[in-house]
Amino acid sequence: MTQPPTRITLASDRYERLAQIRDCFPQASGPDLSPAWQGGRASALARLSAVDAEDYARSRNQLTGAATGLSPYLRHGCLSLQETMADVQARFGKHSHKLAAELSYRDYFRQVWYRFGEAIMQPMESPKVGLGDKPMPDFIAQGFTGLVCMDEIVRQLQQHGYVHNHARMWFAAYVVHWLKVDWRQAADWFETQLLDGDTASNHLSWQWISSSFSSKPYIFNKENLTKFGGESWCQQCRVSCPFEGSYEQLYQQLFTEAVVAPPPAHHIKPPPPTPKGVASLVWIHDEMLSPTHALCAFNLPAVFIFDPALYQHWPLKRLQFMADCLAEMPGVDIWLGQTNQVLARLAQGRIITQNTPQQALKQAAAGLDIEWRTEPVLTETPLSDHQLMRFSRYWKAVEPSLTRGLCTN
Ligand SMILES: Cc1cc2nc3c(=O)[nH]c(=O)nc-3n(C[C@H](O)[C@H](O)[C@H](O)COP(=O)(O)OP(=O)(O)OC[C@H]3O[C@@H](n4cnc5c(N)ncnc54)[C@H](O)[C@@H]3O)c2cc1C
C-alpha cells in the first residue's frame, strides 16, 4: 500500500540530512554519498572554477587526467550547459575547443532523446556485428569478474557513482562484446549505479559501443588500457588477459558476421496538451536543482517530490546528492510521496515546470494541468534526423555558431 504524502524539512546539518534520506529510502542501495561529491550549486561552481580547459584537452583520455567531474551537476541542473560553456570559453578562449566539443556531446544526446523519444532504448540502427543477448550476470554487479581492471571499475562505480569516460567505454565494451550481454540490460543496470545517470547519455553511449548507433563496434586492447589507465591493474591481475592482442586479432575473435535486422521505427512523440488554468505552482523536478533556475524566480510556491516510484532504483548516494542540492533551495517545499498525489493536492490551477524528454516524469504527472516550458537550448541550429544520427554531423553543423569568436583569444 502506498504511504500518504509527507512534507520533509531537510536538516541543515549535512550528516543529519544524509541520515534523513537513508530513513526515507530504506531500500536504497549502496554507501552514503562521499564528501567529494557533495551535491548543490556551490559545489558545482567550485568544480567549474577548478576546470583547466587546456589541461583537459591534453589529458582527458587518461584516467588521471583533468576530467571535470561536472556530470552529476549538469545532469541535475545545478549548472546549465550554457553557463558552463560560456564560462570556459570566456576563460580559455580557443583553448576551450576540446571541452566545448565534449560538453556538446551532452546536448547532442539530449537532442536525440527529445527527437526520438523512447526509441533510444532500442537499437537506433541495425548493429554492424552480431551482438549477444545474455542477461547481465550477477558476478559483474558483485565485482567478481576476476579481472582487476573491470572489478575496480565496478568498485568505483558502486562506491562513488562516478567513473571516468574511458573506463566506462572499456567496461561497456567488455560487457557487450566479450561477455555478449544484451546492451539494453547492461545499460539499464549501469544507469542505476551512476550519480550522473542520464538515459540519453547512457543508453546512446551503450549503443555507440555496441554499433547500433555508430558505424562500427568499439573495442579496446590491453595496450590501450595500460596506455590510458596505467600498469597497476595489470600488475595485480592473476588471470589470462582477454584484452591481449592487436585490434585485428580481437576483432576476429569477438565478432561473427554482421546481422542485418530491419531498422527500428523511430517514434516522435505528439506534443503535450495545451495547459488551461491559471499558474499556481512550480514543480521543480530532478533536472532543475539550482536556486538560480529561471522558474525559481516566479512568485509562486515551488515543490520538489521524492517519489519512491521514480527513485526507488537510484542508489542512496544519488538521493543524498539531490538532498544536498535542495538544501540550497530554501524556497522549495519538499515532499515524499507520489508525484501525482502531491501535485494534485498543492496545485490550485496550472502547474509550471521545465520540459524534459524523461517519459517517467511525464507519466508520474499524467492527467494534471501542466505547462512544460521549453528548456534553454545550447544551440539554435536546426538539425535534421540525419544529422542527429552521428555526433560528427551534429558537431559539423553546430560548431561554427558555438565557437564563433574564439579564434582571436
Ligand atoms: C557506457 C557509457 C555510459 C555513460 N553514461 C552517462 C550518463 O549516464 N550520464 C552522463 O552524464 N554521461 C554518461 N556518459 C558520458 C561520459 O562518460 C560522462 O559524461 C563523463 O565521463 C562524465 O565525467 P566528467 O564530467 O568528468 O566529464 P568531462 O570529460 O569533464 O566532460 C565535461 C562534461 O561534458 C559532457 N560529456 C563529456 N563527454 C561526454 C559523452 N561522451 N557523452 C555525453 N556527455 C559527455 C558531460 O556533461 C561532462 O560532465 C557515458 C559514457 C559511456 C561510455
Image: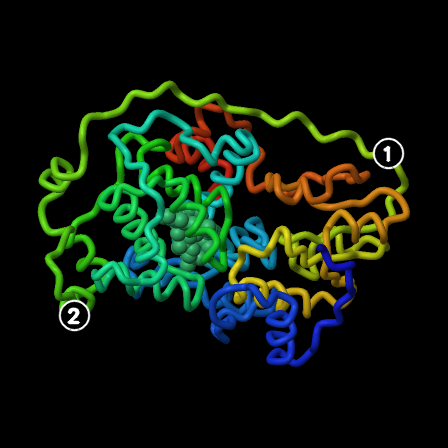
**Element under label 1?**
loop
Q: Distance between the residues labelled 2 and 1?
A: 63 Å
**Image coordinates for residue 12, horizontal then vertical, percent:** 69, 78
Where residue 409 appears, as percent x and y from the top left, is 44, 52
Q: Residue at x 25, y 30 (%)?
A: 130
Label 2 is placed on what type of residue?
Gln
For residue 276, which numbered disc appears in the image? 1
Q: Which amino acid does label 1 sit on?
A: Lys
Q: Can residue 94 be seen in this view?
A: no
Q: Which colour scheme is used?
A: rainbow
Query: Which residue is at 69% across, 55% downward?
Result: 293
Q: In this view, does 256 lie to the left or right of 91?
A: left
Mark 1 beta carbon near ligand 1 (under 8 Å): no
Q: Looking at the image, is mark 2 or mark 1 earlier in the sequence? A: 2
Q: Residue 236 carries which label?
A: 2
Q: What element carries label 2?
A: helix
Q: Does the residue labelled 2 lie within 8 Å of ligand 1?
A: no
Q: Where is residue 305 in the image (x, y as percent from the top left)?
A: 71, 57
Number of other residues with Cα within 10 Å of mark 2, as a class: few under 14, some 14 to 19, many 20 or more: few
Q: Tell me the quadrant of the picture where the N terminus can be found.
A: bottom right
Can residue 137 be seen here? The reply is: yes
Q: Say which of 400 and 62 sits in front.
A: 62
